[in-house]
Amino acid sequence: MFQRVMVAVVGIPFLLLVLLWMPDWAPAILVTAMCALGAHELLHAVGVNNRPLRWTSVLAAVLVSAEIYATAWLDRSFLPLLALVFVFALFGLAIGNYGKPTAIPFGHLTMALFAGLVFPSMLGCLLRLRLVYELGPALAFVPLCISFGSDTFALFAGMLFGKHKLAPHVSPKKTVEGGIGGLVGGVFGMALMWAIIHWTIGYDLCTWWEAVILGVVGSAISQMGDLSFSVIKREFGVKDYGKLLPGHGGILDRFDSVTFVSPCIWLLLTMWILR
């Protein structure tokens, strides 16, 4: 617990510095690094040992994140082209190694595709929010506040009231009561961000009922993300994805829920509220 607290003491001010006050290139570098590390952690956890395959996937994760940043300036997306080249490269490796001791199982191929393309596209939505004109520095914290609020409330609600298992085969400690507490925490996190945005820049991001919907939906997606990455860990018998963050594990252990909630919030904000 002490290590978890100390990581939070150092990490939260660092996130505030990078996402709020530094130029756009700084959060772009941060999110790109997170995407690369997360892709590497995921491939290592599932046993993808083919180095060309692993590093091709990590490179793709970097390029996907960089493409998000470039799109904000060029007003043109290269993601379809990047995805096509990546798929060709993966199957080129599979063809070249087929029938050899280094043959690539199809499961590894699909996991590399997820790690190099799907995962950074999801987590990269944190950068998409940060690059929204004027409101970006505040919007980037919306999925973070919802996710961390949901995680915190779920933890304490589960400890105090937890009796009914939520998904015992996936995460034995998670309870239905904790999940309900997480929904409350998501609404609290969203309300906190609404208040901060209102009082600092005088902008009402949404109505109160829209904030409640964002909090509930965001928390539900956040908890699904947590369980989804736990499924992978259970199947491959790993406790943590990495050791980068003491007391938390790797990037995926700490930002698994953020990975799922970021695209959800980005879509809801840009298509529904900020339209």
Image: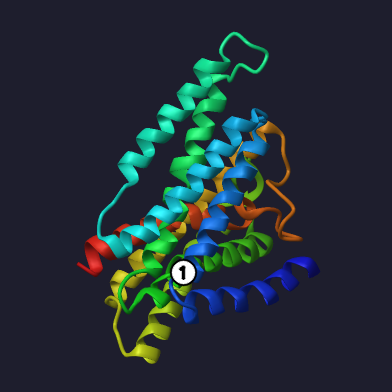
Residue matched to label 1: 25
Circle 1: residue type:
Trp
Residue at far left of view: 275
Q: Nearer the viewer, residue 47 or 32?
A: 32
Q: Which of 25 and 143 is in front in this view?
A: 25
Whether residue 195 sits left or right of residue 72 in the image: it is right
Which quadrant, please, contains the N terminus?
Answer: bottom right
User: Which residue occupies the foreground of this view, 236 or 104?
Assistant: 104
Task: Name the residue at 25% across, 55% down.
Answer: 76
Helix, strand, or loop for circle 1?
helix
Q: Is residue 234 above or below residue 271?
A: above
Residue 115 pos. (x, y %): 52, 40
Q: Tell me what residue is drawn at x 53 percent, y 34 percent.
A: 112
- Name the image quarter holding the C terminus: bottom left
- Residue at the location (29% across, 70% down)? 210
82 sits to left or right of 169: left
Residue 101, quarter of the rendered image:
top right
Q: Would residue 211 be visible to someone looking at this image?
A: yes
